[in-house]
Amino acid sequence: MIKVDRQLMLLVLALVLCLSIVAVSAVSSIPMAAGNFGSHLESQDIPALNYHKVDNYHHALSIPPGEFEEQIKYLHDNGYHSINPDDLVANIKYGNALPDKPILITFDDGYADNYSNAYPILKKYNFTATIFIITNMVGKDPRFVTWEQVREMQESGFVFASHTVNHLPLTNLPADQIENELVQSRDEITQQLGVTPKYFAYPTGAYNLQIEDIVRKAGYTAAFTIRYGQDGPKSDLYALERIPIFKSQQTFRSFFIRLNGAPLLERFGAIRN
């Protein structure tokens, strides 16, 4: 198991303890009347990690392969189990059961290193991921995955979803162009993989209520933002939150705090993307 320095561990434990006290106090004040427990009895707040690149470039979105493996090994050694978006949505909507310590691992854009670097590491530790791909880049730009690579990962349990055709900020586009980006990317993925994608991630994280409505009408089940937070029974399915993971001077320390301190940090807005 990866060792975490004592000071960091104590800090996170203190944050979680404070949150637990607040939560217990809040629950104890709720009248336990019949009917308080509904279909969300088993729902829980679930972390969804948001990565982009796994390479050695000096860029905030680039996690070196060694550091990425350190993070995935930590998840494995500490009992996390990867889930897919279907599992997440079923838990949010219906309270469907999940494995212990569920976590959704996602990548935006579909860079080639997702296949060459991230995929072998995830397989090594028995994790899968959801990759939101820019369909106009797949197989056309060497920086991005090919459809052959996508199909191989799909056979290993990876989920592929839409990140539009051209990765344009949707808030800058007219409604008809937004619809085209959503529908054309959905249709291309369906044609290439034989499965219609049900999930979507907003390019650059830009969205509003009108765009949410267009995504819904385009037939997507849910959509992901880049806002920091976990997802649970109160989440908007078309504005699901994630925990962005960036490269920093102490990347694992940042990862550890963002993951383990998420309940408290989200509540008090201590982390901004």
Image (cartoon, grey):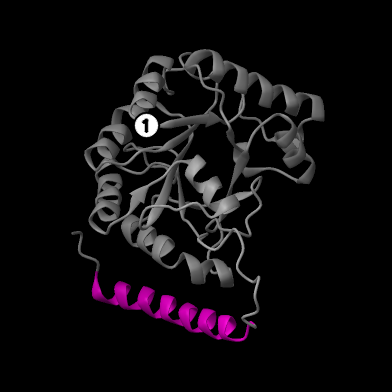
Residue lying farthest to the front in this orientation? 34
Quadrant for the N terminus in the image: bottom left
Question: Where's residue 55, x and y in %?
Answer: 33, 36
Residue 226 visible (yes or no): yes
Apparent side of residue 131 relative to residue 233 in the rendered image (left or right): left
Of 1 and 82, the residue lying toward us: 82
Question: Where's residue 59, x and y in %?
Answer: 42, 42
Of 95 and 71, the residue lying toward us: 95
Which residue in the protein does label 1 denote?
Answer: 157
Label 1, residues with CA under 10 Å away: few <14, some 14-19, many ≥20:
some
Magenta segment: 5-30
Question: Where's residue 210, x and y in %?
Answer: 79, 41
Q: Magenta region's main secondary structure?
A: helix
Residue type beneath disc 1: Gly
Q: Residue at x 56, y 58 (%)?
A: 232
Q: Is residue 73 above or below residue 212?
A: below
Q: Residue at x 32, y 78 (%)?
A: 10
Q: Secondary structure at mark 1?
A: loop
Apparent side of residue 117 relative to residue 265 in the rendered image (left or right): left
Apparent side of residue 50 relative to residue 167 in the rendered image (left or right): left
Report how many numbered discs are placed on residues in the image.
1
